[in-house]
Amino acid sequence: MDRRNKPSALAATPAAPPQARVDLVGDRVTAVLPTGESVEVLLTGATVLSWKGAVGGGAPEERLWLSESAVLDGSKAVRGGIPVVFPVFGQSPADVATSKLPQHGLARTSRWEFLGRSTSEADASSKTATSNGVQLDFGLTSSSADPKLKSLWPFDFALLYRVTLEPGSLVTSIVVTNNETDKAFDFQVLLHTYFRVGDITQVQVDGLGGASYSDKVDGFKVKTQAEGKVDITGETDRVYKPEAGAAQALTIVEGGRPKYGITRDNLSDAVVWNPWGDKTKSIGDFAPKDGYKNMLCVEPGSVSSWQTLEPGDAFEGAQSIKLL
């Protein structure tokens, strides 16, 4: 019998879009996007060990440099990737509160807690996440920091570090909170990013022309960068203060082509570092010794002066790296 009013077929339930896979195995957190791009974070220092990103639909490639002799068992800071520097950059003068801490402070050698993952659906207020990305959150407090080091800088603090992986980009952001009830503390913070490059002699940094900088290789003399791009022709260790501060975008160029675009939020300084050949001989965990040919550190931070954080206040800074 012909039935003119047949019931309509039930609409098929749309399949959920592919999601990032996040795994915590031992002391490492790994996130892999459906595109195959990935990031790996060591709980020691919340150090990003690896970032494999792709451009224009190509295959993901490693974008960070990691020493072949990097110590990954938590006994010392990692040489390579993206170590977190806090609450001091370098060594402190004897008359400041961080003077007893080792170089670059306590965050990069303390074991952080993995606080979990989120996506743009779970955090619609995020300015950085998309439906194709994933966010990994890590925390460190004065009570969970390395006991031997926190006694050398006895302030009540909390750090929240977020690593956001998206197709073609990586964002790392940090929030520093002063949990003291009645006293301020001074600090410095920096994201010590080791970029992987093909040939350092073909690499330049754009965006620093005309900026003043402290040249650590030349006795900390204050100089002014010539206009144009910064060439890397020997040992380089400079703390730049771009006139536009954090608003000044930076670009790593290789072979005349833009390779990495770096934008900064509330991190007004930029350290440019390459140890070159002679210096690597004195760095025990730098391998191979000619590895300087394939790396360049461009490090957003707030290190040319001290940030004063009042009780209950918070400071937030971030870097966003885009593959070009």
Image: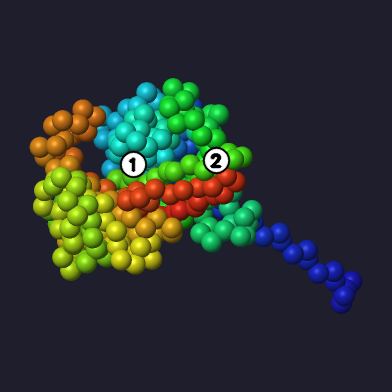
User: Which residue is pictured at 64% across the width and 53% down the height?
Assistant: 122
Left or right? Give the position of 69 relative to 315. Answer: left
Q: Position of residue 144 (x, y in %)?
A: 53, 29
Label 2 residue SS: loop
- First in residue order: circle 1 vs circle 2: 1
- Pick the quarter of the image with the C terminus: bottom left
User: Which residue is pictured at 81% across the width and 69% down the height?
Assistant: 8
Q: Is residue 21 above or below residue 280?
A: below
In this orientation, which residue lies closer to the viewer: 236 or 292? 236
User: Which residue is pictured at 43% across the width and 59% down the height?
Assistant: 265
Disc 1 marks which residue? 89
Callout 2 amino acid: Lys
Distance in Å between CA atoms under marks 1 and 2: 22 Å
In this orientation, which residue lies closer to the viewer: 20 or 219? 219
Disc 2 marks which residue? 183
User: Which residue is pictured at 40% across the width and 26% down the height?
Assistant: 74
